Image (cartoon, grey):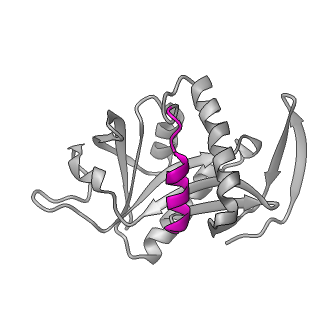
Amino acid sequence: VSVCAEQHHNRISGKLKMSCNNYVRRTAVSGDIAAIKALFCLVRDFMDEQGNPQWQDGYPYDDVVQNFVSGGNFRILEIGGKVAAVYSVFDSDGEYDDIEGRWLTDGEDVKNKNYLAVHTLAVSPLFRGQGLAKAAFREAEEEARLKCKNSIRMDTHIKNLPMQKLLSSQGFTYCGTIKSRGESAFICFEKVLV
């Protein structure tokens, strides 16, 4: 876990941009709920501008945020006391059992349950372009290794091209599609940890 060593502010496109060489990673607590909800609102707007319908129905819903916080699933990357990025981790995901395709770590007749599922990754617009999404993947990988998981799995909307590009750049492999929250437009990726 890093501590912020340097922080500076720049004006870019009329918005205050903040960047930092380092961040603090921690598990979200109830006092973070308002900041997490505000971050998701901003990210939904950005996705809409990009033509990505993911989360436009209000997901992650308020009860989902509450449950992820109370369950200890949200991780925060914090810079200068601000929630710069958030993501959630789970020891498995039942929706991943019904993939159209095949996970890299599944056998012919055996489903691998020893993976870390990463969800709801979002970076605040104030910190976009600072490498925090990549940092979140590094942190998730470190957590998976500490838990002796053999892989990391993630899904994203078929129209979320920036996330697909990021996943590929971080060593994830396309594995197939799943239905999530009733939709069938989610594609799945897995990274094997060796």
Q: Which residues are magenta?
A: 57-72
Looking at the picture, does residue 62 appear above or below residue 179?
Answer: below
Side of 56 where 144 appears, left or right: left
Between residues 53 and 34, which one lies in front from this camera angle? 34
Q: Residue at x 68, y 60 (%)?
A: 32
Residue 161 appears at what percent x and percent y?
A: 49, 32
Residue 155 position in % (x across, y down): 40, 45
Place of residue 69 in the rendered image (x, y in percent of width and height, measured from the top left):
56, 63
Residue at the spot 60% in from the left edge and 35% down from the top edge: 44
Is 35 situated above or below 166? below
Depth check: 150 or 18 in front? 18
Q: Quadrant of the N terminus?
A: bottom right
Asked if the magenta segment contains residue 149, the reply would be no
Q: In the rendered view, would you say 114 is above or below 48? A: below
Residue 137 in sight in this render: no
State which quadrant residue 148 falls in: bottom left
Occupied quadrant, residue 181 = top left
Q: Quadrant of the C terminus?
A: bottom left
Is 25 on the left or on the right of 19, as rendered?
left
Residue drawn at point x = 69 percent, y = 53 percent: 34
Residue 51 in the image: state x and y as whole percent: 54, 22
Instruction: List the single residue furthest toward the front.
Output: 63
**Residue 64 belongs to the span the image colors magenta:** yes
